[in-house]
Image: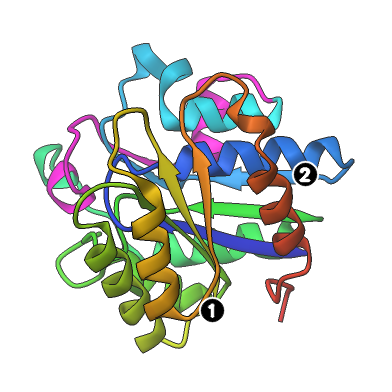
């Protein structure tokens, strides 16, 4: 069984987009795939099908019912804010221990490939004390780090990589998503690759046919060959 955690350098960078592409490619290879997005903010039940959770369910071939939503995303909040603040707005809080236990339970019960998608960036707070980084460290699974292509992404990406390394987390791959109108990508890729001393993958985002991009095939192969096996 292989589990990979998908995180990013910030919000609206493309975690769900990358997760969907990986799910589609691995399912096409005949693999059994499941995915979780345990924490979601900006979630409106009336827009479930277009939410990140709904899009993940669609990629999994599952209906976007509230039963399925609850199965993969039990901590949902309406305000499009960091999860600690969004939870406070509703008089709630995320119990970090329960979040870790939920994630570990899914890892133990998965039969083949499991993706766990985080929320926001690496250092987004979950409660008064814990961040997404603490969550990833508690699970100790390989990471796919998703970055955007914009002015400033070099610093953001290298900072995220340093923080992940500080917790001895294995970064399986860095993937830069490119949107129309973004700054030229080649210089960002070259600088990050040079300073991080690793290959940087790229994929166009929200472009027709982009899920067929060869980066997804390459990344799916990395996932299957990763050290994300049950330990």
Neighbourhood count class around disc 1 (C-alpha, 10 Å): few under 14, some 14–19, many 20 upward: some
Residue 54 picture location, percent across and down: 50, 25
Residue 123 in sight in this render: no
Which residues, given as a range, are shown in magenta? Answer: 62-86
| Residue found at x 45% / y 71% | 193
Q: Which picture quadrant has residue 214?
A: top right
| Residue found at x 62% / y 22% | 209
Residue 178 sits above or below residue 181 on the image: below
Residue 180 picture location, percent across and down: 36, 28
- Which residue is the site of mark 1? 170
- Which residue is the site of mark 2? 26
| Residue found at x 19% / y 57% | 152
Count every numbered label the image shows and give the total: 2
Q: Is 215 placed left or right of 221 in the picture? A: left
Q: Is the C-beta separation of discs 2 and 1 under 8 Å?
A: no
Relative depth, front residue between 92 and 19: 19
Q: Which picture quadrant has residue 14?
A: top left
Q: CA distance from mark 2 to mark 1?
A: 21 Å
The C terminus, quarter of image: bottom right
Residue 84 lies in magenta, yes or no?
yes
Q: Which picture quadrant has residue 86?
A: top left
Residue 24 picture location, percent across and down: 71, 35
């Amino acid at each position: 069984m292989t589990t990979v955690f998908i995180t990013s350098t910030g919000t609206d960078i493309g975690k769900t987009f990358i997760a969907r592409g990986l799910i589609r490619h691995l399912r096409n290879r005949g693999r059994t795939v499941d995915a979780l997005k345990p924490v979601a903010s900006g979630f409106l039940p009336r827009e479930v099908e277009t939410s990140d959770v709904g899009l993940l369910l669609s990629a999994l071939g599952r209906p976007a019912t509230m039963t399925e939503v609850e199965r993969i995303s039990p901590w949902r909040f309406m305000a499009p804010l960091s999860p600690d603040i969004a939870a406070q707005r509703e008089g709630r809080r995320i119990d970090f221990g329960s979040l870790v236990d939920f994630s570990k339970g899914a890892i133990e019960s998965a039969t083949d490939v499991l993706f766990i998608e985080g929320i926001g960036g690496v250092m987004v707070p979950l409660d008064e004390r814990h961040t997404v980084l603490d969550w990833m460290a508690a699970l100790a699974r390989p990471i796919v780090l998703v970055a955007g292509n914009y002015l400033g992404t070099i610093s953001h990406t290298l900072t995220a990589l340093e923080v992940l390394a500080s917790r001895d987390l294995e970064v399986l791959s860095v993937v830069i998503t490119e949107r129309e109108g973004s700054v030229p990508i080649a210089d960002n890729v070259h600088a990050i690759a040079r300073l991080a001393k690793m290959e940087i993958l790229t994929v166009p985002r929200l472009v027709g046919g982009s899920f067929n991009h060869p980066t997804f095939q390459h990344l799916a192969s990395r996932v299957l060959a990763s050290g994300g096996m049950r330990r």
